[in-house]
Image: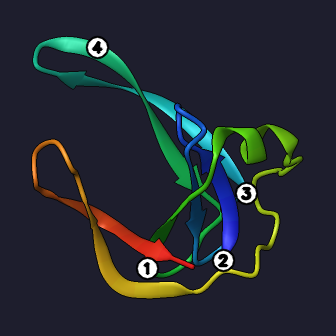
Amino acid sequence: MYFYKFTQTKKGIVTSTEPLTGLNTTTKMIGGVEVPVREQTGATGDVKFGFTAISPELASKMNLQVGDKLPLELTDKQVVNNVTGEVVPNLYWAH
């Protein structure tokens, strides 16, 4: 798994099955409003994302860059939004 980003709350790490080498921003109309949308580049095939819970204190000590390899494994268990109960598309627990 490859480091992609920390969650906003710094309580989790999002990883990818392939290294994502960059981000492009395009503008799209959503609900009649122009919104900047990020698109991943540098990946081939079907990229899956993993989620691993961590503490904010540990996140502040980690010096990770996008694409850094991490010794995590992707599981088949999908992440579920604990507020809405909905499955988060293409996001699986990683350990």
Q: Which quadrant of the view contains residue 84?
A: top left
Q: Disc 4 designates what residue?
A: 34
Q: Disc 3 designates what residue?
A: 21
Contact between marks 1 and 4 (CB within 8 A): the answer is no
Decide which of tag 1 and tag 4 comes sooner along the chain.
Answer: 4
In front of the other: 56 or 28: 56
Q: Quadrant of the N terminus?
A: bottom right
Closer to the camera: disc 1 or disc 4?
Answer: 1
Decide which of tag 3 and tag 1 comes sooner along the chain.
Answer: 3
Residue displayed at 61% across by 54% down: 54
Cα distance in 3D space between marks 2 and 1? 14 Å
Residue 79 versus residue 76 in the image, above or below: above
Q: Quadrant of the C terminus?
A: bottom right
Q: Is there any visible trace of residue 13 in the rendered image? A: yes
Closer to the camera: disc 4 or disc 2?
Answer: 2
Circle 1: element type? loop
Question: In the rendering, at what x and y percent does residue 60 appear?
Answer: 79, 37
Decide which of tag 4 and tag 2 comes sooner along the chain.
Answer: 2
Residue displayed at 76% across by 73% down: 70
Q: Is there any visible trace of residue 19 in the rendered image? A: no
**Hey, what amino acid is under mark 3?**
Thr
Crowd rating for badge 2 (residues with CA inside 10 Å; few <14, some 14–19, many 20+): many
Q: Disc 1 designates what residue?
A: 46
Question: In the rendering, at what x and y percent does residue 44 appear?
Answer: 56, 77
Decide which of tag 2 and tag 1 comes sooner along the chain.
Answer: 2
**Hey, what amino acid is under mark 1?**
Asp
Circle 4: element type? strand
**Hey, what amino acid is under mark 2?**
Met
